[in-house]
Image (cartoon, rainbow, N blue to C red):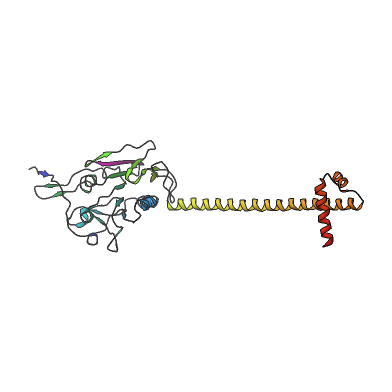
Amino acid sequence: MTTKTTTKPFIIPTSGPDHTQLPESDGTFVKNFAEHPQSILLTDSIEPVLERIHPDGQYAIGQDSGIYWRITEPKHKGAEAPDWFYVPGVPPNLDGKTRRSYVIWKEMIPPLIALEFASGDGSEERDSTPLSNTEEGEVSEPGKYWVYEKIVGITYYGIYVIDTGELEVYKLVEGSYQKMKPNQRGHYPIEELEVELGLWQGRYINDSQQPWLRWWDNTGKLLLMGKEREKIAQAREQKEAQARLKAEQERQQAEQERQQAEAKIAEFQQLQRDAVSRLRDMGLTTEQIAEVQSLSVEQVKQILEADSSNESS
């Protein structure tokens, strides 16, 4: 006997439990040690971009958090949990409470981008099996690719196969995912955020072996993590402090040289005045003194007048 399987169009429910009434975990383990630091790296480095785009703070980031799209029993079966996703235009908290999950039928705003960090070969993340029912009422579990594409409507879907270091990104075009081609930098543009997603080889935490998913701006400049920004800021401050110190040292040196030059000029002028006075006392005329000292007659007169004023005082 052949069991007939049918696929019916799925419609997201318009009402149902909220995030406080749905499980926040299905009890499974995180599948690899890279997931947690990779999620932190993505969130940390894109935060300044999101703060600029959302000055009101209206956005949410999920990290291995459930996106509920159907009502099932057990309840956690109605969710997919991307390793990282971003939703624009929604509050980070609901009614003063931290989000436990993201419930589509409560907000009806799909994530702009979702990323999966595949521990296997990526076949689970590429599974496009649709939700279907048998004649006996059994429901086949749909693939997450199908859920993201056909039900939730996530604009960008990225699959990063950790073991091979391969990244593929899909974009939703007229209801279907199209595989994107990387640009000349090997990155995938996320136009709405004016950023690019790509792979970066470098040391993060204590791991320099595997490539990491990172963001770049649309000019190809790497978006830095908070610690990287802090180090650059500290280096800039140190450089500026050194520049200020050097400028102060140069100012002090110039002031010292100025004072020394003024002292030498004053000493020379005093010697010149003394010589003029001696020549006057010897009976030389103003013109003769000027010739001997290589001065003008007017300069000699000024020196003699000043000398007379000092003597009278």
In this picture, residue 236 sits left or right of residue 48: right
Q: In percent of the image, x 28 and y 44: which residue is there?
A: 157
Q: In percent of the image, x 82 and y 55: which residue is there?
A: 305
Residue 171 on the magenta segment: yes
Q: Is residue 217 above or below residue 227?
A: above
Q: In percent of the image, x 62 and y 53: which residue is there?
A: 248
Name the spot of residue 300 as percent of width and height, x first. 83, 49
Q: Which quarter shows the C terminus?
A: bottom right
Judge whether residue 50 can be spotted in this image.
yes
The residue nearer to you, when weighing 67 against 237, is: 237
The residue nearer to you, when weighing 46 against 205, is: 46
Q: Is residue 90 above or below residue 287?
A: below
In this picture, residue 294 sits left or right of residue 134: right
Name the spot of residue 183 as percent of width and height, x first. 36, 37
Judge whether residue 37 can be spotted in this image.
no
Please, which residue is most extreme toward the top here?
184
Please, which residue is most extreme toward the bottom here?
96
Q: Quadrant of residue 212?
A: top left
Name the spot of residue 122 as percent of width and height, x first. 29, 43
The residue nearer to you, when weighing 279 against 223, is: 279
Please, which residue is most extreme toward the right here?
282
The stretch of residues the image draws in magenta is: 164-173
Name the spot of residue 32 as percent of width and height, x first. 34, 50
In this picture, residue 40 sits left or right of residue 114: right
The secondary structure that most of the magenta stretch takes on is strand
Q: Which quarter shows the N terminus?
A: top left
Report the number of numbered marks: 0
In this picture, residue 11 sits left or right of residue 95: left
Q: In percent of the image, x 30 and y 44: which residue is there?
A: 158
